[in-house]
Image (cartoon, rainbow, N blue to C red):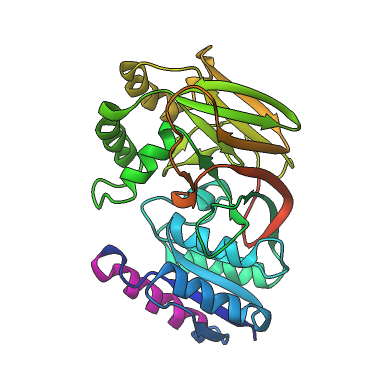
């Protein structure tokens, strides 16, 4: 018998999150586990409850989408505590990457049970350090992509949208953000080399997918011990809207205005020219303002039942 902590978002989906959480708790209990419900109605309260209990747990299970997974990563990253995922959100980026079931509680429970029996995948995570990061949680960890340019401004607007969901939400948010867009000034330090740029998009990818299916860095891997810095030259507004269909297909890298740089460590801060950078988002969650440093933690997260390509 294992002692499992479970976190869900009871306010999501007009009560759907509470129902899914109850089903998960019941299924794990029926399998003979000692289950501790760590859901407290807010990200911060659930995080703090999990941090208090983490030394007493054999695994932490999160129920929901990318926001719940992001919360779980903060508790489990760089620790022996494994993470179980019941993927039930509009965006399930890490579940997609690790070939975990989506919107299927029984199948998700099967993968968690397999993980508790030893089927565990160890994957890389991004680690963000900076004096202006949102609390709690400094450093902040992420599994998919950190956004710091127009991608972050879009994520900020999209995080408040109830509808539509998935990638279409980001297309709507982009259309709303474009009227206020101006190219951003950024100072980048990549593995010790520093240069100033004016850009439209700045992203640091640990895995290929973000935003519920946008393939910003198709060649990224969660097991290679590297990050991919994705930057674009200053784009006109019409070009930004044309970029989204290409992101869905992962074909945008043929555009010579887009550059991908492999790195172990990326520093991001305001540059001397261009508009001010928006606050950064990672896995769809607010991380905080520059300056900050992103590094890769190879094998920094253990996930129950996942399969890494």
Q: Is residue 94 above or below residue 206?
A: below
Residue 69 image point, x, y percent = 51, 60
Residue at x 37%, y 27% (from the top left corner): 244
Residue 131 image point, x, y percent = 59, 52
Regarding residue 219, the answer to whether it shows in the image is no
Decide whether the magenta segment is chiefly helix, strand or loop: helix
Q: Is residue 59 above or below residue 141?
A: below
Location of the N terminus by quadrant is bottom right
Query: Looking at this view, is 261 or 99 the one in front?
Result: 261
Regarding residue 139, the answer to whether it shows in the image is yes
Residue 152 image point, x, y percent = 43, 39
Residue at x 30%, y 70% (from the top left corner): 11
19 vs 214, left or right, is: left
Location of the C terminus by quadrant is top right
Residue most toward the top? 256
The number of discs equals: 0
Q: Is residue 285 magenta?
A: no
59 vs 47, left or right, is: right
Residue at x 54%, y 53% (from the top left corner): 133
Q: Is residue 217 above or below residue 169?
A: above
Q: Magenta stretch: give its range.
A: 14-28
Residue 106 image point, x, y percent = 46, 69
60 vs 121, left or right, is: left
Q: Is residue 27 magenta?
A: yes
Query: Looking at this view, is 229 or 293 the one in front?
Result: 293
């Amino acid at each position: 018998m294992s002692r499992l902590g479970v976190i869900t978002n009871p306010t999501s989906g007009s009560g759907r999150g509470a129902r899914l959480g109850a089903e998960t708790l019941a299924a794990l209990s029926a399998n003979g586990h000692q289950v501790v419900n760590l859901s407290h109605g807010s990200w911060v309260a659930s995080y703090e409850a999990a941090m208090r209990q983490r030394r007493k747990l054999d695994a932490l299970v999160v129920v929901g989408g990318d926001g719940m997974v992001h919360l779980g990563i903060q508790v489990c990253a760089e620790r022996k505590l494994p993470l179980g995922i019941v993927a039930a959100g509009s965006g399930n980026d890490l579940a997609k990457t690790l070939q975990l079931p989506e919107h299927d509680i029984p199948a998700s429970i099967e993968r968690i049970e397999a993980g508790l029996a030893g089927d565990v995948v160890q994957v890389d995570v991004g680690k963000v350090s900076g004096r202006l990061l949102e609390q709690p949680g400094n450093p902040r960890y992420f599994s998919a992509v950190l956004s710091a340019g127009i991608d972050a401004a879009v994520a900020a607007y999209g995080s408040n949208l109830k509808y539509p969901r998935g990638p279409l939400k980001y297309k709507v948010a982009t259309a709303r953000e474009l009227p206020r867009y101006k190219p951003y000034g950024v100072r980048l330090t990549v593995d010790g080399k520093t240069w100033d740029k004016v850009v439209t998009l700045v992203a640091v990818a640990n895995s290929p997918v973000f935003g519920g299916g946008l393939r910003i860095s198709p060649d990224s891997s969660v097991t290679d011990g590297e990050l991919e810095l994705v930057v674009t030259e200053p784009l006109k507004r019409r070009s930004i809207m044309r970029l989204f269909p290409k992101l869905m297909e992962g074909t945008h890298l043929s555009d010579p205005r887009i550059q991908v740089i492999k790195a172990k460590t990326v520093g991001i801060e305001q540059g001397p020219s261009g508009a001010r950078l928006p606050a950064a988002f990672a896995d769809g969650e607010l991380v905080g303002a520059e300056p900050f440093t992103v590094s890769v933690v190879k094998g920094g997260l253990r996930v129950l039942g996942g399969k890494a390509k």
